[in-house]
Image: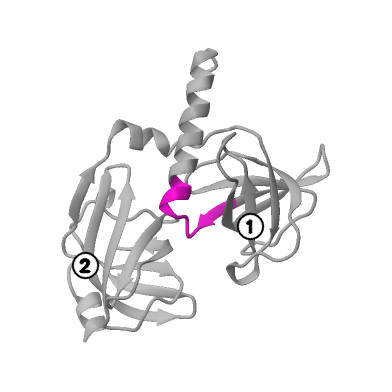
Amino acid sequence: MIFKALFSGKRSAIPASKLPIPDSFVDVFVGGRPSRSVTVESVGPKVLVTREALGRAGEVARFIYATPAGRFRFGTRIVGVSGQTTTFELPRQVELVAAASGAQKRSSVRLDALVPGYWRYAPNGKGIGEFAKGNVRDISRGGCSLIADRQFKLGQTVEVKLQLSSTGAPLVLLGEVMRAEPIPTSGKHSHGLRFQAVTAQEDHAIMEFINRRQAELRNRGLV
């Protein structure tokens, strides 16, 4: 009955600016269980798909997420679970929690800065072995570029350790390899990582680093 209602009904009239953005992170609560931070795979006219299996078909879910327009939430139901993805019915309405401020919009900017870092493989989301040296650039709240002396496979997960402030502890972030390409001039490899399961504290630390670096560049007349 759920599938019949989905694929025979009208398309959602909710503006795209109020819906989750593909490749962004959302917090999902299913069946009263603790929230899970997962990646949005796709948003169609009738369904929304996230990565990871989050429950069972028919269970009620609540989404909390942010877009450039603000912070939103809505309730919906799981349509189905297949492998490592979960499909949800697109909501009939979305509630605005907080409108985006200028500071929030600025924090989504990707910062083209080179930062020393370390990495190690993290199969199944857990780091193993010793950290190896690398360089990190193009840092944003959603991901970064990691330069390493070897090429990773698409879909692999790695942990990246970054020192973003002179006083705080280093951040250890989990990232999925979305892009990999060689750097002919150095013989190294550049990888586009998408962060996974970022906590509120980690997100805040990334935002502070970006805003601080941007302020330094403005003071030097470089932006």
Residue at the front extreme of this rendering: 167
Vertical placement of residue 11 versus 15, above or below: below
Element assignment for label 2 = strand
Magenta includes 99?
no
Which residue is at the far bottom? 1
State the image coordinates of residue 141 (x, y, percent, origin top left): 47, 45
Which residue is located at x 82 percent, y 37 percent?
A: 185
* Marked residue nearer the N-terminal end (2 or 1): 2
Viewer-nearest residue: 31 or 6: 31
Q: Which residue is mark 1?
A: 159
Please state the extent of the stretch shown in magenta in the rendering: 193-203
Assess disc 2: are there few (<14), some (14-19) or many (≥20) residues with their C-alpha within 10 Å of its C-alpha.
Answer: many
Q: Dot 1: what SS?
A: strand
- Which residue corresponds to mark 2? 75
Residue 56 appears in which quarter of the rendering? bottom left
Q: Work out whether residue 132 can be spotted.
A: yes
For marks 2 and 1, give the one nearer the viewer.
1
| Residue 223 visible in the displayed image | no
- Picture disc at residue 107: none
Picture coordinates of residue 23, whole percent (x, y): 45, 56
Lateral position of residue 182 relative to residue 62, left or right: right
Count every numbered label the image shows and give the total. Answer: 2
Question: Could you give the CA–CA distance between mark 2 and mark 1, rounded to whole angstroms?
Answer: 32 Å
Q: Amino acid at mark 2?
A: Gly
Amino acid residing under circle 1: Glu
